[in-house]
Amino acid sequence: MKALDIGIAGAGPAGLAAALFLARSGHRVELIERFAEPAPVGSGLLMQPTGLTVLDALGLSSTIHALGNRIDRLHGADARSGRTVLDVRYDALAGGRYGLAVHRAALFSTLHDAVRAAGLPIRTGITLAKAETRQARTALHDSDGEIVGDYDLVIDATGARSQLAAASIVAPHVKDLPWGAFWATLDCEGIDHEARALSQRYDAAKVMIGLLPVGRAHPGEGRKVAFFWSLKTAQADAVKEAGLARWKAGIVDYWPQTAPFLDQITGWDQLTLARYAHRTTLPPYADGIAFIGDSAHSTSPQLGQGANMALLDAAALAHALSSAASVEEALSAYAAARRSHVRLFQLLSYLFTPFYQSDSQTIAWLRDRLVATVANVPPVPQVLAAIVSGTLADPFTRAGLKECRWLEAALRQA
């Protein structure tokens, strides 16, 4: 295929990764961002072996490892009894896999700095409203109706609230999920916590409290943790009205070790309310636009796959464009490459979420007594590790990737 003019809407991780892959394949790319300055949104996230493999393919492994924090297991316990009800260990699988918890600013800066170093253009302060296909080219219009660019292909990486996806012929049905979470990024230097684990405490499925040590947002800064507390988003205003002191006291009652972290929270402005939705754009392309990341698919964050799936999308789309004879053939190949993996993990997220975020006492009872017991019986530990790693179905081959050699990577980072 000849070199293409490609416009990428959205300068988040998915858009930045796509720009790097495509520019290295010889295409002419430019990023279009609605904010005056591109910036990360959110607190911490867990990079899985899938997303880490994509970053390694981009030559960014050492940079992200220098900022992130290695995670070896996901551990959850009943807040009252202390009984372990979740213990997923990456080393249940052979090969030395692990997770890497990162601040979103660390992931963003790693990719953004690489885009800048490559000299790729980012146009900022532009709100895209629609796309129009004319004679095999796709024009992007801003909110005033003006054309801001004309391309052989547009990639929409603007996220779950994408206007381009909503206005397309493949606009997804959106099911808002009732449960969300308050998130905060807090200092952890000198505070006792489990440094290599995502730690959680539960009261049935109605309360979930978590600590994720995410390393540094920027070089030279102190280490941070991402703190989160699950709730129904419709109850957020009532929680705030009851007062910050009451909210913090309830958490400390469940988990006293969180007190030094909660002491850092002095106002609601330090907390971000995350809302989640289940949506799928099928197929993930239409009228000269390819949808990647949350523009193409989203679900609850229970399995920690969101950013990793977005990076896989970017790699798969670039691989399809490098292998196909036409844009149309490439878009079809991209959809086929990602279909089974996306559907599987959306289904798993949908099924797992009620065990940790719901009003069901029955489901929580099953989780605490039956599921927790079965989770220790082979091959279940291996299956759970593969689910968390994002590798229960092979995401690499059809994206043109080879999984990292994890033991060697660990030695390089040591």
Image (tube, grey):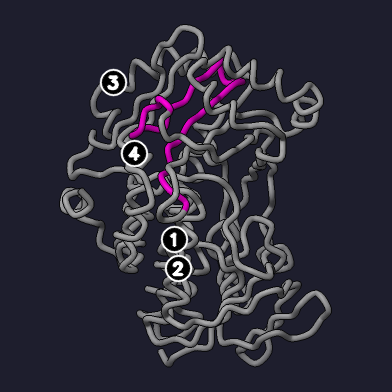
Q: Could you tell me which secondary element the residue under label 4 belongs to?
A: strand
* Relative height, residue 95 to residue 327 (above, below): above
Identify residue for label 1. Answer: 311
Spot occupied by residue 46 in the image (x, y as percentages of width and height): 43, 44
Specify which label sits upstream in the sequence, 2 or 4.
Answer: 2
Identify residue for label 4. Answer: 71
* Relative height, residue 82 to residue 169 (above, below): above
What span is colored magenta in the figure? 191-217
Q: Which of 376 and 249 is in front in this view?
A: 249
**In whole angstroms, how far apart are the C-alphas of marks 2 and 4?**
23 Å
Q: Nearer the viewer, residue 252 or 45?
A: 252
Spot occupied by residue 36 in the image (x, y as percentages of width and height): 68, 70
1 and 2 marks in contact (CB < 8 Å):
yes
Q: Which mark is residue 17?
A: 2
Q: Which mark is residue 340?
A: none
Mark nearer the viewer, 3 or 2: 2
Specify which label sits upstream in the sequence, 3 or 2.
Answer: 2
> In this image, 243 relative to 299: left or right?
right
Mark nearer the viewer, 2 or 4: 4
Spot occupied by residue 374 in the image (x, y as percentages of width and height): 33, 19
Mark 1 belongs to which amino acid? Leu
**In whole angstroms, how far apart are the C-alphas of marks 3 and 2?**
37 Å
* Relative height, residue 245 to residue 214 (above, below): above
Q: In which quarter of the image is the N terminus?
A: bottom left
